[in-house]
Image: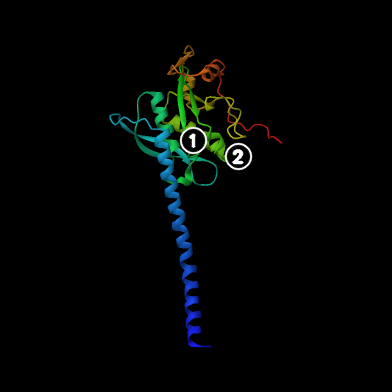
Amino acid sequence: MTRWRIWFLSALAFAVVVAAIYLPVLRRHLKESAKIQQQTEEQAKRELTQPVIVNPSEPRVNAKLFWASGNGDGTVAPITVELPLSSDPVLRAKQVLNTLLAGPVDAELRTLPPDAALLEFYLLKDGTGIADFSEALATSIPSGIESEQMAADSITKTLAANVPRVTKLRILIHGQEVETLAGHLDLSGTFPVNTNAAATAPSSHTGVAHISANAGPPYLSMLLTLPAAPGKLAQPASKP
């Protein structure tokens, strides 16, 4: 074997070894870069479609936001975030829910789809909150009782920790009542939020509070049929 062939084969073997060492590193860097780019695009889109209501003069408080625990067991856990929060319960609910939708620093702990948006939040005098989300909450979330349950838990627990006026919650999708979130989690009733507050709420409080004047017919229809008792987080009968 001539000398140039020996050098060529040696160089080729060296290149293969180097590639085997650095290829996983390069792949990891590319994955991290793609994740950062995705988060940047998501943030830019959110700033255009879903601005977080922030008043710098409002006092900053340690808000508890519930994202995935990271244990792989389908549970959520609180993360403390310092936010300027309004004393008005409706604005406060919008602030914490918009921050929840923006997602945690670790995207793997996200419980809600990155393209979902909070369209509006209403609060009835009896403490029932009405959160109206864009269609992406139902269409972009992974279908399955665990992922859907985590989404509902992150929303209700975040409201419970930061907006004590909300005693129960109804979730709408683009202004409409839907039977399930993505085929499994029952959305036909209300979710309990602050049960202790519900037990002490005056029964004489009826009607609507903090409802904007431009609320359309879907909201009016929903308000007239809103059940008095909180519903359950339930899995509907499986479909064939």
Q: Is residue 64 visible?
A: no
- Image vertical order of residue 19 relative to residue 233, above or below: below
Q: Residue at x 42, y 28 (%)?
A: 93
Q: Amino acid at mark 2?
A: Gly
User: From mark 1 to mark 2, how far is it between C-alphas?
Assistant: 17 Å
Q: 154 or 137: nearer the eye?
A: 137
Which x, y percent locates residue 54? 34, 31
- Judging by the rendered image, the residue that carries numbered circle 2 is 144
Which of the colour schemes (rainbow, by chain, secondary structure, one colour) is used?
rainbow
Which x, y percent locates residue 153? 51, 34
**In the rendered view of the protein, which quadrant contains the C terminus?**
top right
Q: 196 or 213: nearer the eye?
A: 213
Q: Residue at x 49, y 76 (%)?
A: 12
For discs 1 and 2, the disc positioned in front in the rendered view: 1
Q: 74 or 56: nearer the eye?
A: 56
Q: Identify the mark nearer the N-term, 1 or 2.
A: 1
Which x, y percent locates residue 207? 48, 13
Relative horizontal placement of residue 84, taking residue 184 as reference (left or right): left
Relative horizontal placement of residue 165, taking residue 185 as reference (left or right): left
Secondary structure at numbered mark 2: loop
Q: Is residue 208 visible?
A: yes
Mark 2 neighbour density, 10 Å: few (under 14) some (14–19) many (20 or more): some
Q: Residue at x 58, y 40 (%)?
A: 146
- Judging by the rendered image, the residue that carries numbered circle 1 is 116
Name of the residue lying farthest toward the right = 240
